Image: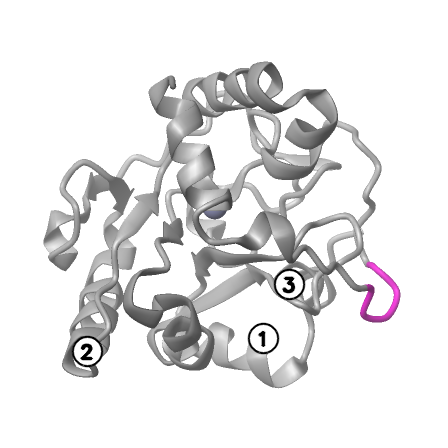
Amino acid sequence: MRPLTALLCTIVLATGAWLTLTPTLAGTPTTSCEVTDQLAEHHGYDEWDRTVLGPDRRLPDDYEPPDLVSAAGANLDARFLIRRLVVDDLRRMRQAASAEGVRLEIGSAYRSAHAQASLRQATVRELGPRAAERLVARPGHSEHQLGTALDFSDTSGAHIWLATNASRFGFVRSYGSESRQCTDREDWHYRYLGVDTARAVVASGLAANDYLSRRHGEE
Ligand SMILES: [Zn+2]
């Protein structure tokens, strides 16, 4: 199996999420499920905590955060890259999880548009275009390109621990049970928004994208 496909299958199938996809619609979506290439309203490198991406929203073609560093700074797998601004809270979260016997492991972090394209193509080849549309964002549409999104393996109860604790460290699950109908639930995918915003998202009961759209006026 090709590495990229193995990665995807590790993320999707090993978690069992493929069998438990239960998207629901919470209120009226503020962004569309339509597949278009509209540029995200907030797409600057300093707007990482308000950028809304989805099937209809993308980053600029040349988007590559200037401050990518190894996840080793958070005592996690050095092969993965994240934005420097994520490191301190990620390290604290890893330490807090470890103190409770939960081992956090990264399955994916920053992905360039090129890497996203390769993953998408591999998924189309392995699982077909319909599955690819549901599982892997098109290049430019993935939160992984922000450098602030991480996939965590479900080792030693990590997903349950994260669901309860991640917001204390500034992370929110981007696609939970409250997600919009167009996005499958992903218990492994977290995005860093900073502690204040993460807590506000959780308190709102909204999906992260819906909260950010309403807060920052994405039309
Ligand atoms: Zn992800």
Mark 2 vs mark 3: in front: 2
Q: Which portion, as a residue range, is magenta?
A: 25-29
Instruction: Please say if the residues under marks 1 and 3 sit with CB atoms less than 8 Å apart.
Output: yes
Query: Relative to the observer, which residue lies in front, 6 or 88?
Result: 6
Q: Give the number of the disc on residue 101.
A: 2
Which residue type carries mark 3?
A: Leu
Residue 51 visible within the image: no
* Residue at (19% x, 78% y) in the render: 101
Label 1 sits on residue: 201
Whole-Å distance between the Cαs marked 1 and 3?
A: 8 Å
Residue 86 visible within the image: yes
| SS label for mark 2 | loop
Instruction: Report x, y in % for residue 33.
Output: 81, 43
Which residue type carries mark 2?
A: Gly
Q: Residues within 10 Å of mark 3 (few under 14, many from 20)?
A: some
Count of number-bearing discs: 3
Q: Where on the picture, by quarter, is residue 146?
A: top left
- Above or below, 151 against 136 in this view is below
Residue 27, magenta (yes or no): yes
Query: Relative to the observer, which residue lies in front, 128 or 41?
Result: 128
Query: Relative to the observer, which residue lies in front, 44 or 138?
Result: 138
Q: Where on the picture, by quarter, is residue 80?
A: top left
Dot placed on the residue nearer the N-terminal end, 1 or 3: 1
Instruction: Please say if the residues under marks 1 and 2 sit with CB atoms less than 8 Å apart.
Output: no
Q: Residues within 10 Å of mark 1 (few under 14, many from 20)?
A: many
Lateral position of residue 62 relative to residue 98, left or right? right
- Above or below, 15 against 212 in this view is above
Label 3 sits on residue: 212
* Residue at (81% x, 58% y) in the render: 30
Whole-Å distance between the Cαs marked 1 and 2?
A: 27 Å
Which residue type carries mark 1?
A: Val
